[in-house]
Structures are given as C-alpha cells and as structure tokens.
Amino acid sequence: MSTYLHYDALILGSGQAGTPLASHLRSLNLSVCLVERAHIGGCCVNEGCTPTKTMVASGRMAYLVRRATEYGVHDGEGTPRITVAMQEVRERKKDIVDSFRGGGEKRLEAAGVVVEAGRRGSWGEERGGLRWGRGKKVVTAERVFVNVGCRPARPEVPGLDDIPLERVLDSTSIQELGEVPGHLVVVGGGYIGLEFAQLFRRLGADVSIIHRGPGLLSRNDDPELVQCMQRILEEDGIDIIFSATSTTFSNSPSSSAEEAHDLPIRVTTLSAGEKKDFHASHILLATGRVPNTSTLNLSSAGISTTSSGYIPTSPSLQTNIPGIYAMGDVKGGPAFTHVSYDDFRILKAHLAGETARTTEDRTGLVPSVVYTDPQFAHIGPKWGELPKGRGLVSYSMLKAVIDPSTNKIISFSAIAVEAGEIMAVVQMAMVGGLTWMAVRDAVFAHPSWAECLNNLWGGERKEI
Ligand SMILES: Cc1cc2nc3c(=O)[nH]c(=O)nc-3n(C[C@H](O)[C@H](O)[C@H](O)COP(=O)(O)OP(=O)(O)OC[C@H]3O[C@@H](n4cnc5c(N)ncnc54)[C@H](O)[C@@H]3O)c2cc1C
Ligand SMILES: NC(=O)c1ccc[n+]([C@@H]2O[C@H](COP(=O)([O-])OP(=O)(O)OC[C@H]3O[C@@H](n4cnc5c(N)ncnc54)[C@H](O)[C@@H]3O)[C@@H](O)[C@H]2O)c1
C-alpha cells in the first residue's frame, strides 16, 4: 500500500536556493515538503564553502605562525616550530559545519516545512500530475523545485582504480583525513585544486598539481594574473605540472625509501612531451563536478536535460515543463552559492507575480573569488570573452577594463589578500553605473584595502 501525500510545493534537495525557498513558501501559508537525501544545507554548508574556508583559516594560521619571527614575535626559543594536529583541524571544521547545519534544520522546523529523508527518489508521471516516490511514499505537488546540485566528477585516469580507496580523495573525503598527507597530488588546477593545494601545503604536506591546461584556472582567465597566481603557489613550494596530456598511477613504491616515507603511489605524467615520474601518498581529484540528475528519472516526467545531465531553464528558472523549476548548480552555468541564493530571490519575486528580475539581469555581474591567499577575485566578462576596442588599465595585480565610449567599468580582476572585498567596491560602481573617474576620485580611508582603487587608474593603459 502506497501512502499518497500532496503539497503546494515539493523541493528536491536542500541546496542554497531550496532551503530558503522552503521557509519563504511556508511564510505564505503554503504546504511545503523538502526532500533531502543527505544533509540539510547542501554542499555549501556541509562539504563546500563552510568547511573549506574553515580549514583554509587553519592553513593560514599555520602559515602566519611560521612567519611570526618576521613580525618580531618569538616563542622564547627562536623560530616558532609548529605541528599540525589534523584531527583537531577536522574537529574544528566539524563543529562549525554542525552549528551551521543545525541552524538550518531549526529554521525549517520552526517554519513548519515537512522534511523527508529521500535516498532513492525518482520521478514518474501519474494521473493528476507529477510525482516523486520514495519506497512506498508518493508525493505530488502543485509546483516542484529541483535543487539537487552536483557531485565531484571522477576522471578516467589509467591505474586510478588500482589505488586503495583511502588514498584517492575528492573534495569531500579529503576533509576527513586524520593526518596531513606526505605528498598530495592534486589532479586539476581549478578552484578546488588551488584552494586545497595551498591549504595542505601550509598544513605541511608536499604538494604537486597536475593540470591539463597550459595555465592554472581556466583559459578565459587573465593570463598575467594566472601566471602571478602560479608564482605565488610555487613560492609556497607547490610543484605545478602543466599541459599534462597523459597521466598514469600505479600502486607500487619503487624503493624502500619511498616505502619508508609511505609514498606508495607512482605517478607518471607527460607534460608538453616531457615525462615526469614521482611518488605520492594521496591523490585529490579536482577535475570538476557533475549534476545529481542521473537517478531522478527526469525523462519520465518529460523534463529535458543537456547531454551532461544539467537541467536547462528559462531566465525565470522554469524547466520545459510548466510548474517545474530548477535552481542552483543543477541548471548549469556558474556554480556558486551566491548564484544559487540569487536563484531563490528570482523565484521568490517571480512566484509573487512581481515584474521580476531574471537570470539575464545578472549577466556579466556574477562575481567569483578563488580563496587562495592572496585571493583571486573577478567580476565581468573574463579575459577570453571581452569585446574588442575596450581599454585595459592595470596596476600591480589589479586590472580593470573600461568602455571608452561611456567610461563605465566592464570588468575587474585582482589578486590581493582581500581581493573579494576590493572587488565588491568596484562591483557597486558597476551596478550603480559609475564611471571609472568617480571611483578614482572617491576618498577611501587610509590604510584600507579599497584605497588601491585610487591608484589603479594611473596604471599602465592599453587598448584590447
Ligand atoms: C569544496 C567546495 C568548495 C566550494 N567553495 C565555494 C565558495 O567558497 N564559494 C561559493 O560561492 N561556492 C563554493 N562552492 C560551490 C557551492 O558549494 C555550490 O555552488 C552551492 O552549494 C550551490 O549549490 P546548490 O544550491 O545547487 O545545491 P547544493 O548545495 O549542491 O545542494 C544540493 C542538495 O541536494 C541533495 N540531493 C542530491 N540528489 C538528491 C536526490 N535525488 N534527492 C534528494 N536530495 C538530493 C544533496 O544531498 C544536497 O544536499 C564550493 C563547492 C565545493 C565542492
Ligand atoms: N571559491 C569558490 O567559489 C569555489 C571553490 C571551490 C569550488 N567552487 C565551484 O566548484 C566548481 C568545481 O570546482 P573544480 O575545481 O572541481 O572544477 P573547475 O572546473 O574549476 O576546475 C577543474 C580543472 O581541472 C582540469 N582538468 C580536468 N580534467 C583533468 C585531468 N584529467 N587532468 C588534469 N586536469 C584536469 C580542468 O582543465 C579544469 O581547469 C567550480 O567551478 C566552482 O564553481 C567554487
């Protein structure tokens, strides 16, 4: 016997859009069921932003303590010697995640959202509309919101399947290590690769990055800034292998020295025709993410997906089926918490029937920050996407592109300790339609990070 339940709204996945949407819809007195297969708060709170930035803070603390004597701070016996207790780093991270997740759970409960722990949900079409079934429980709803996010991709690398599971990590399992790895090999030099590479280097691991492209991050990022980031990481002692066309792993220390250092993984990679051979203790796979749609049986509900499994939506986040919406990473495009949260705001206004913003309104205005130290922040079209005939101004590690016909700022990139905060100042100028001269002439407090925006405009200029 199946149990049938009907709601005004069914939300699949407790991501960064679905969770606030659930509480909001309850505040309108609508009945809401939120189905989550793992943890309330989704990736950001449980495996993404919150835990990684917590661990990055531990890495920075280790880095600063090592440099304490440069600041005239001594422990009484010369250069401070530090040890990293990985289990304590992990516990601190866990406590912060638990408190964030607990807050989310309480808010949903207080709002009266029905939360279902759905592990094996899939879609089907029924008399009366769309439905989602878990075992014998069947849930139907007037409107359905899909916010199931993505998971780490597993690249095809010869020999990977032969390495013991505990040595092959992804962005989630690496956070549960009980010890600092001896030598971590990071496959992929994107956001996740760079943030974890620097973090574990600072915690004391030897780190190598194996990257497919000729430069870190994406080929659309500003090449000079990307090279600058490369030098910063190399100065930290990270070995970076570019243009890695073919990599193989095998589970075989070649000498007792490697065995003694617990480096059982042999890594062979071809970089621009040159063979590199070394040993490692752990591998971090950081080669992108794939959408969590393969088990949802979306086609039976008629919901279209791309060949990679993303759910395309209209600018107001509607799928091809009326009444079914997709939000956050699962719809493809920039995969950030702030984008997912903005999807919630777009839907909130759209459902209220307001003349609403759409995803098109934020085109060219989605900021991003790589949380290395210093950070790499960017807003606007990337280097590889910029229209021709624009003016580029660069000063140190700050770059702005301006439209010479309007003097408005089109894009901005920076590498700086608080590059994300500096970028937010420029972002406000872009949102408000200010000219670059208005930013130049603003009086910023000294000393502050933002005051570099007075100097930027006197920097080197060229047309692109
Ligand atoms: C290591 C890491 C660090 C990151 N750092 C940052 C950062 O600093 N800043 C930033 O902006 N972004 C960061 N991100 C990206 C950010 O976490 C995501 O963009 C963000 O979480 C948006 O996700 P979402 O709303 O699409 O859903 P998610 O947060 O991915 O949540 C989806 C939820 O759906 C659930 N689910 C999946 N399938 C089903 C199913 N069949 N049934 C029920 N539930 C299901 C999942 O368990 C999950 O809880 C990071 C990501 C990672 C992996
Ligand atoms: N600070 C943040 O906002 C933040 C932090 C972490 C993650 N994220 C989000 O999560 C997403 C996923 O992060 P990610 O770093 O996994 O993906 P990514 O797409 O940013 O980078 C993956 C990189 O791996 C390279 N690559 C792919 N296959 C490879 C292979 N076989 N060998 C070597 N290199 C290979 C790609 O060329 C690419 O540059 C990001 O795009 C971002 O949206 C954001």
Image (spheres, rainbow, N blue to C red):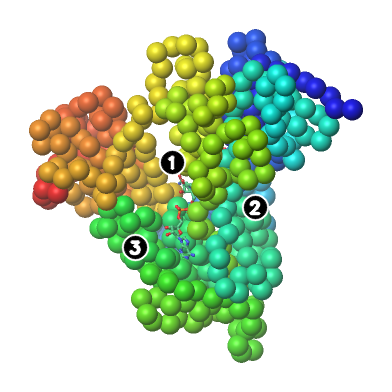
Q: Name the residue: 54% across, 36% down.
A: 304
- The three-letter code of the residue at mark 1 reads Gly
Tell me, yes or no, whether the two marked residues, 2 and 3, touch with CB atoms within 8 Å: no
The response on whether ligand 2 sits within 8 Å of label 1 is no
- Mark 2 Cβ and ligand 1 under 8 Å apart: no
* Nearer mark to the viewer, of 1 and 3: 1
Residue 405 x %, y % = 10, 33
Name the residue carrying label 2: 90
Which x, y percent locates residue 370? 41, 49
Q: Is residue 414 above or below residue 208?
A: above
Task: Name the spot of residue 182 as percent of width and height, x first.
Answer: 58, 72
State whether residue 347 is above or below residue 119: above
Q: Amino acid at mark 2?
A: Arg
Question: What is the CA distance from the residue labelled 2 to the residue labelled 1?
Answer: 31 Å
Q: Does the rendering let one see residue 164?
A: yes
Q: Please identify the quarter of the rendering in which residue 434 is found.
A: top left
The one of 14 and 180 positioned closer to us in this rendering: 14
- For badge 3, the amino acid type reads Gly
In the rendered image, the residue lying farthest to the right is 1
Q: Which residue is mark 1?
A: 333
Residue sitting at 81 percent across and 29 percent down?
137
Residue 365's x, y, as percent?
33, 34
Compute the Cα span from label 2 to label 3. 31 Å
Q: Are marks 1 and 3 in contact (CB under 8 Å)?
A: no
Query: Residue 39 falls in which quadrant of the image?
Result: top right
Q: In the structure shown, which secondary structural element does the residue marked by tag 1 occupy?
A: loop
Give the residue displayed 43% in from the left and 65% down from the top.
Answer: 211
Judge left or right: residue 245 versus residue 379. right
Residue 215's label in the rendered image is: 3
Label 2 or label 1, whichever lies nearer to me, is 1
Q: Is residue 20 left or right of residue 451?
A: right
